[in-house]
Image: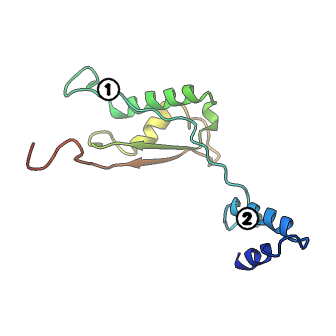
Amino acid sequence: MAGLAALLRCGAHGRGPLLRRQMQEIRYVERSYASKPTLNEVVIASATRTPIGSFLGCLSSLPATKLGSIAIQGAIEKAGIPKEEVKEAYMGNVLQGGEGQAPTRQAVLGAGCDGGRWDGEHVQRSLRNEQRGNTIRRGKA
């Protein structure tokens, strides 16, 4: 990279524009172990959240995975893409006790994004479990 950058400084000696274009292409190529590098296209098509309920309120009968499925379906509808195009799903869940194993997987399956594909190309799922005290100040609550 340093060698190409040094050659870019040669200006209008004939190589400058070509090398500049090659440098731009190199910046957008994904580094991988594949024999041929490919472009990495990442698109966040949509994002939604589940409704916020109160303790033992009207949402207490629905498990978090069902609420997650509804949110995923809403995000897909809002993005206007087919379910087959969903490649990754990220969800956050603070208290997942009693929700079973892999609540994100359950929500993705409940939304119909991963069903019927048995060829190894399943939707990648990730769950973030983070608890913050943003609304509760210690010592003053």
Q: Nearer the viewer, residue 10 or 76?
A: 10
- Quadrant hosting residue 45: top right
Depth check, front residue: 115 or 7: 7
| Position of residue 71 measured from the top left corner of the image (x, y, whole percent) | 44, 30
In this view, the residue farthest toward the top is 58
Q: Residue furthest front?
A: 12
In terms of depth relative to the viewer, which is nearer, 141 or 56? 141
Q: What kind of element bears circle 2?
A: helix
Query: Which of the marked residues, 1 or 2, is nearer the chain's N terminus?
Result: 2
Question: Residue 47: x, y in percent?
Answer: 49, 35
Question: Badge 2: how crowded within 10 Å, few (<14), some, or many (20+)?
Answer: some
Q: Quadrant of the C terminus?
A: top left
Which residue is painted at 19% across and 25% down in the image? 56
The answer to whether residue 45 is above or below residue 134 is: above
Q: In the image, residue 119 lies at what x, y percent?
A: 65, 46
Q: Amino acid at mark 2?
A: Ile
Taking 23 as reference, is 81 left or right? left
Q: Nearer the viewer, mark 1 or mark 2?
A: 2
Distance CA(mark 1)–CA(mark 2): 49 Å
In terms of secondary structure, where does tag 1 sit? loop
Can you identify the residue that label 1 sits on? Answer: 62
Name the kind of residue labelled 1 in the image. Leu
Give the quarter of the figure containing the N terminus: bottom right
**Of residues 9 and 54, the one drawn nearer to the viewer in this rendering:** 9
| Image quarter of residue 61 | top left
Q: How is the image coloured?
A: rainbow
Q: Quadrant of residue 51?
A: top left
Q: Position of residue 138 (x, y in %)?
A: 12, 50
* Residue of label 2: 26
